[in-house]
Amino acid sequence: MDAAVKKAESAASKAEQAAKACDGIAAGMNVVIDSVTGKACEIGMTDGNIVVREA
């Protein structure tokens, strides 16, 4: 197999692995742990108000 093709396939494989590693990161950025209850809570916006919901 041509060296350029091997490099391209390797780069594509690495890009796919990186994309899979990033799945769900954005969603998890708004999650915090309640220090009293230990429960995970999600911070969001509803009708312009900041809300905290149990995740």
Image (cartoon, rainbow, N blue to C red):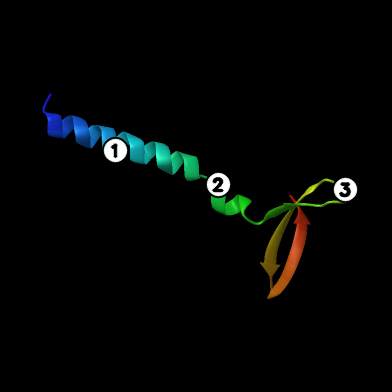
In the rendering, at what x and y percent does residue 37 appear?
87, 48
Earlier along the polypeptide chain: callout 2 or callout 3? 2
Depth order, front residue of 44/11? 11
Please name the amino acid that badge 1 sits on.
Ala
Above or below, 2 against 27 in this view is above
Q: Position of residue 18 (x, y in %)?
A: 41, 41
Label 3: few (<14), some or many (≥20) within 10 Å? few
The residue tagged 1 is: 12
Figure quadrant of the N terminus: top left
Q: What amino acid is found at the position of numbered circle 2 in the picture?
A: Gly
Q: What whole-number distance in Å separates the C-alpha atoms at marks 2 and 3?
A: 24 Å
Position of residue 26 measured from the top left corner of the image (x, y, whole percent): 55, 53
Q: Disc 2 marks which residue?
A: 24
User: Label 3 sits on what residue type?
Assistant: Thr
Q: Marks 1 and 2, how far apart in space?
A: 21 Å
Which residue is label 3 attached to?
A: 37
Residue at image coords 45%, 39%: 20
Q: CA distance from mark 1 to mark 3?
A: 44 Å
Asked whether the residues under the numbered discs 1 and 3 touch, taking CB atoms below 8 Å apart as contact, a structural biologist would say no
